[in-house]
C-alpha cells in the first residue's frame, strides 16, 4: 500500500501486515562501484582510511562506512521480502 514520500521525495510503501515502511526506488550512490572497490582494495592492502580518502579525494568516513557495510553484507543476506511477515513486497 502506498504511504506517501520520504524527505528526499521517493515513494514509500507500507506493508499491510506488519506496518513496516519501505522505499521501492534504488538509492543513487555518489561514487561508482569501481571507485568503491578500488578504495576498499587500497584499504585492505594497508593504506589507512585517511590515506585512501586523500588518494581518491573523498572523506575518510565514506571508506569506513563502506567497510562496515561490506562486513554486514557478508554476515546477513539481503532479503526481498518483509522481515516481519515474510511476504514479498508489493510492486508499484
Image (cartoon, grey):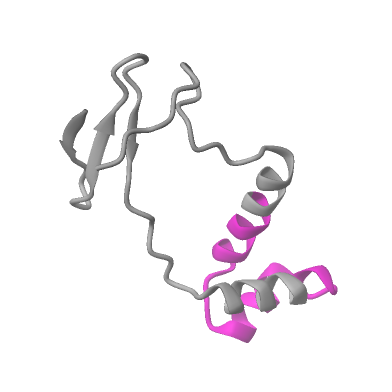
Q: Residue furthest right?
A: 45
Say which residue appears at 55% left-offset and 64% top-offset.
62
Q: Position of residue 49 (x, y in %)?
A: 69, 68
49 part of magenta stretch: yes
The span shown in magenta is 43-68
The residue shown at (75%, 71%) is 43
Horizontal side of 30 relative to 63 (left or right) equals left
The image quadrant of residue 6 is top left
Pick whichever, 29 or 86, lies toward us.
86
Q: Is residue 49 shown left or right of residue 47?
A: left
In the rendered image, the residue lying farthest to the left is: 4
Of 55 and 77, the residue lying toward us: 77
Query: Is 63 in front, or is 84?
Result: 84
Q: Kindly report the secondary structure that dominates the magenta region of the rendered protein.
A: helix
Question: What is the quadrant of residue 82 in the picture?
Answer: top left
User: Magenta span has 34?
Assistant: no
Give above or below for 1 relative to 34.
above
Residue found 68% across the figure and 57% down from its top: 67
Above or below 16: residue 3:
below
Q: Is residue 50 left or right of residue 41?
A: left
Q: Is residue 67 above or below residue 36?
A: above
- Residue 85: x percent and y percent? 46, 16
Instruction: Name the image quarter holding the C terminus.
Output: top left
Q: Name the residue located 43 percent from the left edge and 30 percent from the top edge.
A: 88
Relative image position of residue 86 (x, y in whole percent): 50, 21
Residue 1, how many percent across, how many down? Answer: 21, 28
Above or below for 7 versus 85 = below
Q: Quadrant of residue 77?
A: top right
Amino acid at each position: 500500500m502506498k504511504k506517501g514520500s520520504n524527505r528526499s521525495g521517493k515513494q514509500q510503501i507500507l506493508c499491510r501486515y506488519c506496518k513496516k515502511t519501505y522505499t521501492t526506488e534504488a538509492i543513487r550512490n555518489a561514487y561508482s562501484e569501481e571507485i568503491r572497490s578500488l578504495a576498499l582494495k587500497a584499504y585492505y592492502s594497508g593504506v589507512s582510511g585517511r590515506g585512501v580518502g586523500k588518494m581518491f579525494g573523498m572523506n575518510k568516513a565514506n571508506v569506513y562506512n563502506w567497510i562496515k557495510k561490506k562486513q554486514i553484507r557478508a554476515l546477513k543476506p539481503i532479503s526481498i521480502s518483509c522481515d516481519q511477515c515474510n511476504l514479498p513486497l508489493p510492486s508499484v
